Amino acid sequence: MSTELLTALHVSYIQNLGNSTDDLMYHLTAHLRLNAIYWGLTALCIMGHPDALDKEDVIRFVESCWDEKAGGFGAHPAHDAHIHPTLSAIQILITYDALDRLDVPRVVKFILSLQQPSGVFAGDSFGEIDTRFSYIAVNALSLLGCLDQLDKDKTVEYIKQCRNFDGGFGSTIGAESHAGQVTVCVAALAILDRLDEVDTETLAWWLAERQLPNGGLNGRPEKLEDVCYSYWVLSALSILDKVAWIDSEKLTSFILSAQDTEKGGIADRPGDMVDVFHTQFGIAGLSILGYPGLVELDPVYCMPAPIIEAKGLRKGRFRTTCND
Amino acid sequence: MHGVQRVRQSAEAVAAKKLREQSKIREYLALTDEVLAKKAAEDWSREALGLTTRLLQINPEFYTVWNYRRNILLRGVFPESSPAEINDFLTDDLSMTTLALKMHPKVYWIWSHRRWCLENVPDGPGTDAEGDINGWRKINWERELFVVDKMLNADSRNFHAWSYRRYVLARMPDARSETAELAYTTRKIEANFSNFSAWHQRSKLLTSLWGSGKLEYSKSKEEEFELVRNAMYTDPNDQSAWIYHRWLMGAGADKEVLEREIAVIQELLDEQSDSKWCMESLVHYKRLLLQKHSSMIDVGKVTNDCRRLLRELRGIDPARQRRYEDIGACSIADHTMF
């Protein structure tokens, strides 16, 4: 167990992910490849190693995932376009300042075509709906500077209806509050300047109660802790300016205890197998907690803050103090 | 990757495993290439359908192949099939995904494919004039509720299964009554008070049942207080009941209920003097008294109660002490401070 972030090990773990082609799991997760590159690249940027991957190789791979028929990105060459890898492609290209390699009007058209009459977004043409996809659409359109083309009221209307009495949000109308869905809904509302729709005191209470005695965070009441909620819970708390409502030191120790101290990477829990998803969200959580030496992460976009700052898109930090 | 233990293996063991995997990888990649090539060639044949079955059994997360499978059915198979055959294909797909869910209960794509199957069940076996035009639909949708029951028996918190359950209940041809569903949540809660998913479902059902007048509001609400009190007394450290109790109390418009519940919780706290959730809830409800009923209570005393409880909470729940400080630092009755 380590009490320090093993940056060098994590950098080399991420660099080597693409070389695991002799591992069956590598092939079985091809449907997440573009997402995985975004997670890995973002973690590298937060650790201060933005050049650890071959930029031109990565950009060429992104281009090879383009689905010409649909006008969006699949997660892998020859896979169908879906809104999630499409966001990953945009995030990677923006991180590398290579948006000129993207057919922006076509991607915008693809994303807008997925909005349903109720205001929620579908993931692809087969129509699975989820507030995750609403966030992805809002995030992507905002990064592309095309938010003015979105029917914002309709988008907010659906998210509003997913709010529960505990202040949290679910995946669809009627669904139970879940920390992952809370983050996507709160971040979407932050981008749309509609945080007035959040019951901050109730939601921040519910989020603070996600911390367990071992310091880790769970995603719903009476569930187990998991490193990825270090991001899902923390980013929402950060947008609401309530990170101080949990114990940062204990959470930091919990994340660090889930590191693989030999080969790098971070797992869901101490002693489990690592993966790039938990590596990224563990490091993202540490950045929000102000871990020394890390680049600041923007909690709304889940990208390096300097990049979001440069685009003039910083949101959140809605600091209101008591009146008396 | 969730909950898979890291095992330290020797270099030899790792090398041997990799060697064993090589043939599996070759086989998997060959099958993938074949399927994707057929997809690119817009091959909507039954042979291609069979290949997607094989590939999805190995990797049910391969969303592109689910899409392809649906396109084969829609473009190649259904146009040359009778309604009865179409129904058979969809029933087969539902069975295939039932097996897949047992292995992979949290894969979005599998749940999503089931919805597509259900929504494409054709009219029949009868017609409007003769027999039941909704016969197949009824059979398939009824069976779904049974499948989702099984899934929730295996993991009573699986949020995919709960979402799917709500979807089925909302759309099945022979609607199931909300009171029957309420009874289901009672069973789930009585089996495990800690199942917040069931409490959540209950809050949605009751909102609807009270709104439509199908359940008498005040009587039913009293029964809810009874149920949740049992849960609070059974395990005062379990969040589920306390969160549900907070829903029942709402914005605290009813002073009598507020005071009664404060007394109930105080009694529990007297027995369990270090119960965080008792204290936390007392602060919340006393603040509601201050916000809504200040002209009818002893404001100084209730405010002091809150401050004392907040001090104690800081001691017993240090992880969240800043929250307790923030509540104490602002006027306790101010609901808009944050």
Image (tube, helix red, strand yellow):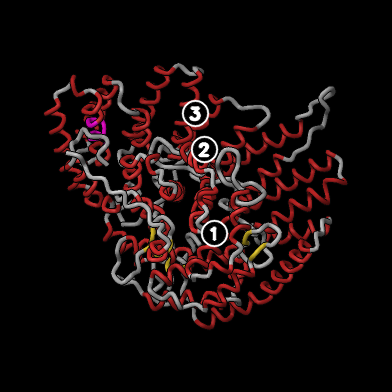
Spatial separation of the CA atoms under disc 3 and disc 1? 36 Å
Spatial separation of the CA atoms under disc 2 and disc 1? 24 Å
Q: Which residue is mark 1?
A: A87
Identify the residue shown where x is 21% and y is 32%. B333
Q: Which residue is mark 3?
A: B205
Asked whether residue B285 is drawn in magenta, I would say yes
In the displayed structure, A259 sits above or below B242; it is below
> Along the horizontal axis of the image, is B154 left or right of A241?
right
Dot 1: element: helix
Circles 3 and 2 on the same chain: no
Stretch in magenta: B281-287
Dot 2: element: loop
Q: Which residue is mark 2?
A: A173
Circle nearer the viewer, 2 or 1: 1
Q: Chain of mark 2?
A: A
Asked whether residue B223 is drawn in magenta, I would say no
Q: Looking at the rendering, which quadrant does residue B17 occupy?
A: bottom right
In the displayed structure, B1 sits above or below B100; it is below
Q: In the image shown, does B315 or B274 lie closer to the viewer?
A: B315
Circle nearer the viewer, 3 or 2: 2
